Image (spheres, helix red, strand yellow):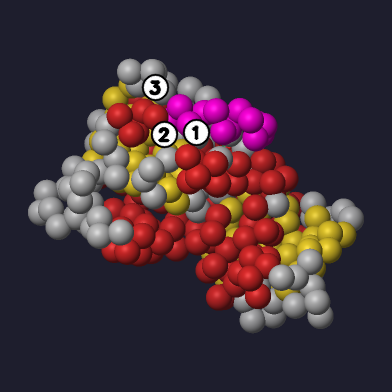
Amino acid sequence: MKQSPIGVFDSGIGGLTVLREITNLLPSESTIYLGDTARVPYGSKSKETIERYSFEIARFLQKHGVKMLVAACNTASAYAVPKLASVLDIPVIGVIEPGARAAVAATTAKRIGVIGTEGTIKSNSYVNAIKRLCDGGAFDIVEHGKKSFDRYFEVKPGKDVVIFTKACPLFVPLVEEGWTDDAVTRIIAERYLTGLKDEGIDTLVLGCTHYPLLKNTISSVMGSGVSLIDSAASTAAEVKKTLEDSGLLSDSKKASHRFFVTDSPERFMTVGRRFFGDRLGNAELSVLSE
Ligand code: DGL
C-alpha cells in the first residue's frame, strides 16, 4: 500500500498546479492524475453534476490502486469532497480546508477575500471552512448584500473576521489561453478585484486551480500589502501529514507519474506544460468506464 500512487484529479489541466506542489514536496510518491478535459469547466455546473463526475473519477482512480485521493479542483472540493470522504475507504483531501487554514494563519487585519469559480463561491465552502477554524465554528456567519463584490460575511461575534467573496469566471479561459501577463487580463483583474481592494482586505485566497498562474497580475492590482494564498502549497503539506499519520508515506527511490485525460491528450500536453513544466509525461486517453 505504501508504494501505491496518490490519485489526483481536476476538471482539466489546472490541477497540475496542485500536483506540482505534491511532487515537489514528496519526490518519493508516485501519482496518477486524471484531468476531466471532456467535461471542463466544472465551475459553472451544479453540485449534483460535480458529485456524479467526481465519483466516476474516484472509481477510475481506485481501480488503478490509489492509496489516497486528492481533489485538486476547488469546485469539486467544494461540492464533492465531503461525500467522497464519507463513502470511500481511503483518505480523501480537497483544497478548501488547507487554503482556509493558510488564510486564517496569514491574516492580521482579519479581512479576508476569497476568489474562485461561480460554483466554489456559491457553495460558501471557504466561508464555512474559515468559520470552522474560528473557534471551532461556534460563531454565526452574517451575510450581507451585494456591493461591488459578490457577498461579504462577518464571522461574529465582535466582527472577528470579515470575508469578502467574488467569483472571477473569466480568469480560467484567460489562463488556458496563456494570457497570464497580458494587458487584457490586467483590465479584467482590475474590474473583478477593485471592490475587494477598496474593502482593505489583507489576505486573498486564490480559490481556483488556475489563479496561481495569475499571481503577478493579481498582486500588482491588489498591492504588496495583500498576501495571496495559494491552496496548492498548503494542500501538498496536508497530503504529507495525512500520509505520515496513516503510515502510508512511500520510501521508494523510483516514483512514477501517470496522466490520464478524458479528451484530446494533445491539448493537455501543450497547455499542461505551462502548469507542470517539462516533467509532464505523455497523457493517456480514458473514457473513465474502463
Ligand atoms: N479546476 C477548477 C477549479 O479549481 C477551475 C476550472 C473549471 O471551472 O473547471 O475550480
Is residue 55 a member of the stretch shown in magenta?
A: yes
The numbered disc on residue 288 is 3
Query: How many angstroms separate mark 1 from mark 3 (CA)?
Result: 11 Å
Using a 10 Å C-alpha cutoff, classify the residue at mark 3 as few (fewer than 14 neighbours), some (14 to 19) or many (20 or more).
Answer: some
The structure residue drawn at horizontal position 69% and vertical position 46%, both measured from the top left corner, is 123
Res 44 → quadrant: top right
**Circle 1 SS class:** helix
- Kindly report the distance in space between the C-alpha atoms of the residues bearing marks 2 and 3: 10 Å
Q: Earlier in the sequence, mark 2 or mark 3?
A: 2
**Residue located at (29% from left, 63% from top):** 244
Q: Position of residue 116 (x, y in %)?
A: 63, 49
Which quadrant is the C terminus positioned in?
Answer: top left
- Counting residues from the start of the chain, the first of labels 1 and 3 encountered is 1
Q: Please state the horizontal and vertical placement of residue 7, each as a whole percent of the image.
A: 34, 41
Secondary element under disc 3, as helix, strand or loop, is loop
- Taking depth in this image into account, of 135 and 213 the one nearest to the observer is 135
Q: Point out the stretch of residues depicted in magenta.
A: 44-57
Is the C-beta of the residue carrying label 2 under 8 Å from the nearest atom of ligand 1?
no
**Is 158 located above or below residue 265 in the figure?**
below
Q: Which residue is mark 2?
A: 58
Spot occupied by residue 269 in the image (x, y as percentages of width and height)? 34, 32
Q: Are marks 2 and 1 in contact (CB under 8 Å)?
A: yes
Q: Residue at x 34, y 38 (%)?
A: 33
Left/right of residue 132 with respect to residue 15 in the rendered view = right
Q: Quadrant of ligand 1?
A: top right
x and y, in percent, of residue 93 in the image: 45, 51
Q: Quadrant of residue 278?
A: top left
Mark 1 — residue? 54
Q: Amino acid at mark 2?
A: Ala
Which element is circle 2 on? helix
Q: Main secondary structure of the magenta part?
A: helix
